[in-house]
Amino acid sequence: MPLKDLIPHHLSYCISKLYEGYWSGYPLAEMDLGMIADYQEKIKAELDKKYGSYRNLDNSSDTLESIDYVLMRLQELFVAGGIKGNKDAKVFIDALAHYFDEVKEMFAEIDNTGWHPDDPS
């Protein structure tokens, strides 16, 4: 399975719902955050199966760990009262969208080159 297929097509929809949570207090934004966190865990689990550990993917692992941090911080904001109008939440949502775009690009590059961490090059 190509790595790019690990990123669900409707991930951008879930992220757009987080933005709605920021702008209008969309009541299901926290559920969308949970779905994104589930996708993230599935991505890492599949990478662990394929490469022994997602951490073997150098730059991708840094980005995946940054996503984990952003997800944790957004969850903390929901617990503390929600994200509506919270500027920190907006910054974290922007970062989340950016990091997933980076992961998509990195996965596409790995798919195109056939790179594997065990390759000597």
Image (tube, grey):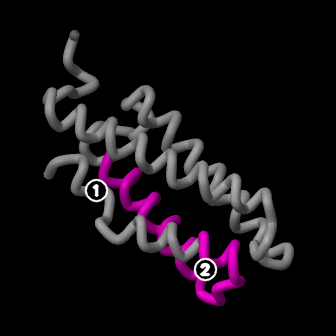
Q: Are marks 1 and 2 in contact (CB under 8 Å)?
A: no
Whether 99 is drawn above or below 22: the answer is: above
**Secondary structure under badge 2?**
helix
Location of residue 83 in the rendering, given as x and y in whole percent from the top left corner: 75, 72
Q: Which mark is residue 108?
A: none
Circle 2 residue: 29
Q: What is the total number of numbered labels drawn onto the structure image?
A: 2
Indicate which disc, 1 or 2, sits on the residue closer to the N terminus. Answer: 1
- Mark 2, other Cα within 10 Å: few <14 / some 14–19 / many ≥20: many
Q: Main secondary structure of the magenta part?
A: helix
Q: Is residue 22 magenta?
A: yes
**Secondary structure under badge 1?**
helix
Stretch of the chain drawn in magenta: 19-47
Circle 1 residue: 6
Kind of residue at disc 1: Leu
Location of residue 5 in the rendering, given as x and y in whole percent from the top left corner: 22, 56
Residue plotted at (23% across, 33% down): 110
Residue plotted at (47% across, 68% down): 38
Kind of residue at disc 2: Ala
Q: Is residue 35 magenta?
A: yes
